[in-house]
């Protein structure tokens, strides 16, 4: 329909196949193509008679696909008769455990004991940046865990300027941040380098020595482009294993 309207207006319309991925490596795309080779999966996604084939812009890059079993849900123990608790009862799910472990590491690394050799000084809270894809239970738990440990918090969000005020009123965790850069106000967006630089300039953060954790590869690469150290988050276990391997998290820490 759009092509016909463009041609009727005397303009040029070209059909472009959107089959090149700038994010995934060939092994990941091969699995996607294999899944949609099944007619049951292809229905509604692939046109009849066509075959879904992805090309990777990252040809030659390593990659691996792991298929994990579904995590079963565990029935909770029957509740005991209610009584006034003597201790603060918190959630202890996977998101909470990961948040506590990551917050404990950040607090421990920024207490003045960890050296930042490239700068000849100690690591500071402003050198650490954690970005998440969605404001889910883990993000909220991590914010509160960090705040409870006295770690300064900053945020970069791609919200539009006209909706951000409404969002702040709806989600109380925004009050936990010491500073926020809103893309709609700045007219900059992630993963472009300018929005990271704006955060550093506004709050006096040295981006060359910030730790960036994100599950979106494009954002990770954007952070690296401005000199930040970045970790591509794919699972809590892998993040924990890497932190343990580098001596940044105790071997027995929960993930």
Image (cartoon, rainbow, N blue to C red):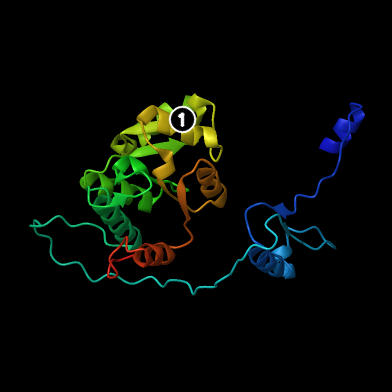
Rendering coords of residue 54 (x, y %): 73, 59
In this picture, residue 68 sits left or right of residue 97: right
Q: Residue 7: tell me if it is visible.
A: yes
Q: Position of residue 113 (x, y in %)?
A: 23, 52
In x, y percent, where is residue 109?
A: 27, 52
Q: Nearer the viewer, residue 171 or 16?
A: 16
- State left or right for residue 35 relative to residue 161: right
- Is label 1 in a helix, a strand or a loop? helix
Q: Is residue 210 above or below residue 75?
A: above
Q: Quadrant of residue 249?
A: bottom left
Question: Does residue 72 appear to the left or right of 191 in the view shown?
Answer: left
The quarter holding residue 9 reads top right
| Vertical order, 207 against 58 (above or below) | above
Residue 17 drawn at (x, y percent) = 80, 50
Q: Nearer the viewer, residue 184 or 64?
A: 64
The residue depicted at 40 percent of the width and 27 percent of the height is 165
Give the labeled residue for mark 1: 198
Q: Quadrant of the C terminus?
A: bottom left
In the rendered structure, the answer to whether residue 133 lies left or right of residue 8 reads: left
- Please tell me how crowded label 1 is: few (under 14), some (14-19), or many (20+) other residues with Cα within 10 Å: some
Q: Quadrant of the N terminus?
A: top right
Query: Of residues 78 and 203, which is closer to you in this image?
Result: 203
* Residue located at (33% from left, 59% from top): 98
The total number of labels drawn is 1
Q: Residue furthest front?
A: 120
User: Given the current orientation, which residue lies at the most extreme bottom position?
Assistant: 69
Picture residue at 82% right of the left edge, 36% below the top: 2
Please indicate, yes or no, whether residue 189 appears anywhere in the rendered image. no
């Amino acid at each position: 329909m759009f092509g016909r309207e463009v041609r009727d207006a005397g303009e040029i319309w070209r059909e472009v196949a959107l089959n090149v991925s700038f994010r995934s490596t060939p092994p990941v795309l091969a699995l996607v193509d294999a899944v949609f080779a099944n007619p049951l999966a292809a229905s509604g996604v692939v046109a009849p008679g066509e075959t879904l084939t992805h090309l990777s812009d990252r040809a030659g890059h390593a990659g691996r696909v792991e298929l994990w079993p579904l995590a079963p849900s565990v029935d909770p123990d029957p509740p005991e008769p209610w009584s006034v608790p003597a201790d603060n009862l918190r959630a202890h799910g996977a998101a909470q455990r990961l948040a506590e472990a990551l917050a404990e590491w950040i607090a421990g690394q920024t207490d003045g004991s960890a050296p930042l050799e490239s700068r000849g000084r100690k690591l500071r809270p402003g050198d650490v940046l954690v970005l998440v894809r969605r404001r889910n239970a883990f993000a909220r738990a991590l914010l509160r865990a960090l705040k409870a440990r006295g770690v300064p918090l900053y945020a970069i969000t791609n919200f539009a300027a006209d909706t951000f005020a409404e969002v702040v009123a709806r989600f109380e965790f925004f009050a936990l941040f010491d500073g926020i850069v809103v893309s709609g106000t700045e007219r900059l967006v992630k993963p472009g380098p300018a929005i990271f630089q704006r955060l550093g300039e506004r709050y006096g953060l040295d981006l060359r020595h910030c730790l960036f954790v994100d599950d979106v590869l494009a954002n990770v690469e954007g952070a690296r482009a401005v000199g930040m150290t970045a970790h591509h988050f794919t699972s809590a276990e892998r993040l924990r294993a890497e932190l343990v391997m580098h001596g940044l998290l105790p071997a027995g820490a929960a993930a």
